[in-house]
Amino acid sequence: MIPELGHFALVLALLLAAAQSILPLVGAARGEVRGALLMATGPTTAIGHAVFVATAFGCLMWSFAVSDFSVENVYQNSHSLKPMLYKITGTWGNHEGSMVLWLLILALCSAAVAAFGQNLPATLKARVLAVLGMVATGFLLFTILTSNPFNRVWPLPENGQDLNPLLQDPGLAFHPPFLYLGYVGTAVAFAFACAALIEGRVDAAWGRWVRPWTLAAWCSLTLGIGLGSWWAYYELGWGGFWFWDPVENASLMPWLLATALLHSAIVVEKREALKVWTILLALLTFSLSLLGTFLVRSGVLNSVHAFANDPERGVFILILLAITVGGSLLLFAWRAPSLEPKGIFSPISREGSLVLNNLLFATACAVVFVGTLYPLFADLMFDAKITVGPPFYNATVFPVFVPLLVAMAVGPLLPWKRADLWAALARLRLAAAIVLAFAVLYIAMVDRRLLPALGFALALWVVLAAGTDLAERIRLGRIPLRESLARARGLPRGAVGGIIAHAAIGICLAGIAGKGIAPERITLMRPGEITTVGPHTLRFDGQRDIIGPNWRGTAGVLTLLRDGEPVAILEPQRRFYPVQRMATTEAAIRTSGIADLYAVIGETSAEGATVVRLHWNPLAPWIWVGTVLMAVGGLVSLTDRRLRVGAPARRRREAAVPAAAE
Amino acid sequence: MTRKRRRLWIVMLCALGLGTATALTLTAFEDNLVFFHSPSDLAAKQIPPGRNIRIGGLVETGSVDRATTGDGQLQIGFRVSDGAASLRVTYTGILPDLFREGQGVVAEGALTPEGTFRARQVLARHDETYMPPEVADALKRSGHWQPGEPPPPARDWNTLRPNAATPAGAGTARMTN
């Protein structure tokens, strides 16, 4: 009964989404007065559509929670012995369920536009809702026609087939929701761009409306990618955190463009320049999000994430992709020339530096795009099976990022309109001197490899530059400390968020560079044998059997020794999930916050020796600390009054409140 | 600065960015593309030893052996077959969880002068019903998987014998009996 209710809710949502995509658009075309009634259907249908999708999602989650194996999707992806957390997160741990999650987030976004967009011009709001409705209609059709999560099975199976054990993990349980929140958030920016093209008007206010959505989407995408790479780090047991896998790239490409969009929207808001480019970025960012969905769901590319796939679905998403990209670019080609550019600026200025930022991010994205799709292209055109591996990306993305990181320090110090580069550089001389001294000392005393040294130096440079930016803004050292602190409290949240996010990039980069000097050791060990990795000494004390709720396995016992005395025990595991007949590796990680000791065990040879792989990863935790801080920076920036959707209205209310109190 | 000059600036910057991206991509492509070859490809073509390539196929049943090398490492050797030809592969390190005899496997590494394959990385991921696309393709080309038919069931892969001629149109399930 419950699954049928969910199915029915999904169909009702489709009808409402179809209405949402047509009626407000017609209303907006008729004009603000004559079309008012039709435009008023926008928010109503959007909220109704969200309620029904939420109902469907709730029904699916209920079926998973109570293990209703008469539902095909639950039968294929769940098991009665699975812990409750994974039963619930299993709702989106499969294709059908993840599509419903996609729909839910999209519906909630359009409901949020409907509910909180009171200060948007009526026609713009109607058009934004209509575009979101079109996207939702496409994906609802896709879900209902090709991947219905509520199909039943007969005869009733006794138990389920269980979720892929690699996905039964807290890191991956929350990776898809964040990633989808990011992907779908870019849909709102896309809708705003399409609506602006239809209106034929882009102004500073438009930039201010788009930015919070982009910012929120960017934060989620950052967290989603971070969670995914953290999962890869401790669950796949390869010791790395980023493999340039096509599906990882599929999430990185929208991130790169969303970062560019975030920065170019500032220029639109402050200077009313770069309008056409910003619109194009918004369209492309969402297109790449869709491409990401296509790559993951169709299985055209070989990757860790390619689960059982269905070509029919791939074709459907490809059609959706073609309609969205083709349609929006056509609209762009038709309407963009009518957008009059306004701002005029010199290349050396804040907006000039933001153009450079956009250029470099777009270049990085283009390079990743080519690397990700070339194997597909080569397969179709020349029938050659090719892999583009990490060396390609290292050789292409790093050279683009080096100037980006160098320039990123200078940009925030430049004033708008017209700037003096030397004045900005002079303010960075202290930072530059420290970085130079560090680089010389590091190469002379610690390590002679150039690339990690460059990474550390750039990381330090970025952090120090963020610090310089903050010190300049609060005039630290030039006015009494108390006044500086008062200024710090008065800084706009947007500026504080920017400083945090920029410093976070440096922290993350330090962690990545740390991986470049991390020693590893793969060795055969018999119980009682001792080995070393980095500064640590470990003794292998054999293996013991362990049993979990839906798996069994062995744990290797590695004792960390300091001066011959045991200080800690690491227990890397190998698990076997009998239902899926699949084995997984659980790495044991002991972190000090500054470095990780990482251990994995492999198979045991006939003579009783076990393969042990040990990594000592200096600064590795910083990769994720930096990622989280980036998102925190975004969130702080999001609380800036200026960006809040109802800001002007609130200001009026605030002005009114003291008057009433007096 | 006039609108025209600014436009010129932006166009020049874009050209610079595009040029850099193209140059970087092309030079990186030259060195870093990794081609996939099936064991029969390798038997037919001359691939110079030392070049980085990927190979793939099914791990032959009963071909996996383990030995301890002089420096205390565990070296694993196995044969990878596409049904028509097979190749010996050696690898030192931890094999992926899903490495099993009869399973599809992809390995990245280089040929040695002796004609065996030295793997730097062995990829066997996914669930056990998954077949890497390259392996599926190699099996199709060697006649062990008729196009248009479902892939041979995973549990039957280990009974695919190299050089076993497949009658045209015979179902894969029948072939394995």
Image (cartoon, rainbow, N blue to C red):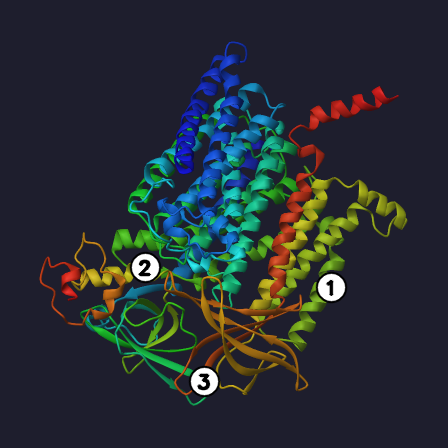
**Label 1 close to label 3 by CB (< 8 Å):** no
**Residue type at numbered disc 1:** Ile
Using the image as rendered, state which of residue B101 and residue A77 is in the foreground: A77
> Residue at (54%, 56%) from the top-left corner?
A170
Q: Residue A400, can we see it?
A: no
Is B103 rendered above or below residue A116? below
Is A443 placed above or below A33 here? below
User: Label 3 neighbourhood size at 10 Å, few (<14), some (14-19), many (20+)?
Assistant: some
User: Which residue was labeled with disc 1?
Assistant: A434
Instruction: Label 3, secondary structure: give it.
Output: loop
Inspect the image, locate mark 2, and give the three-letter code of the amino acid beneath it.
Answer: Tyr
**SS under mark 2:** loop
Q: Is disc 3 on the same chain as disc 1?
A: yes
Residue situated furthest bottom in the rendering = B70
Residue A111 in the image, given as x and y percentages of width and height = 54, 29
Residue picked out by circle 3: A609
Residue neighbourhood size for the residue with mark 1, other residues' Cα within 10 Å, grouped as few (<14), some (14–19), many (≥20): some
- In the figure, is residue B9 to the left or right of B94? right
Residue B36 falls in image quadrant = bottom left
Q: State the CA–CA distance, disc 2 to disc 1.
A: 53 Å
The x and y percentages for residue A198 are 48, 23
Question: Do labels 2 and 1 touch, CB within 8 Å?
Answer: no
Three-letter code for the amino acid on which mark 3 is drawn: Ala
- Kindly give the residue lying farthest to the top in the view shown: A34
Q: Which residue is mark 2?
A: B130
Element type where label 1 sits in the image: helix
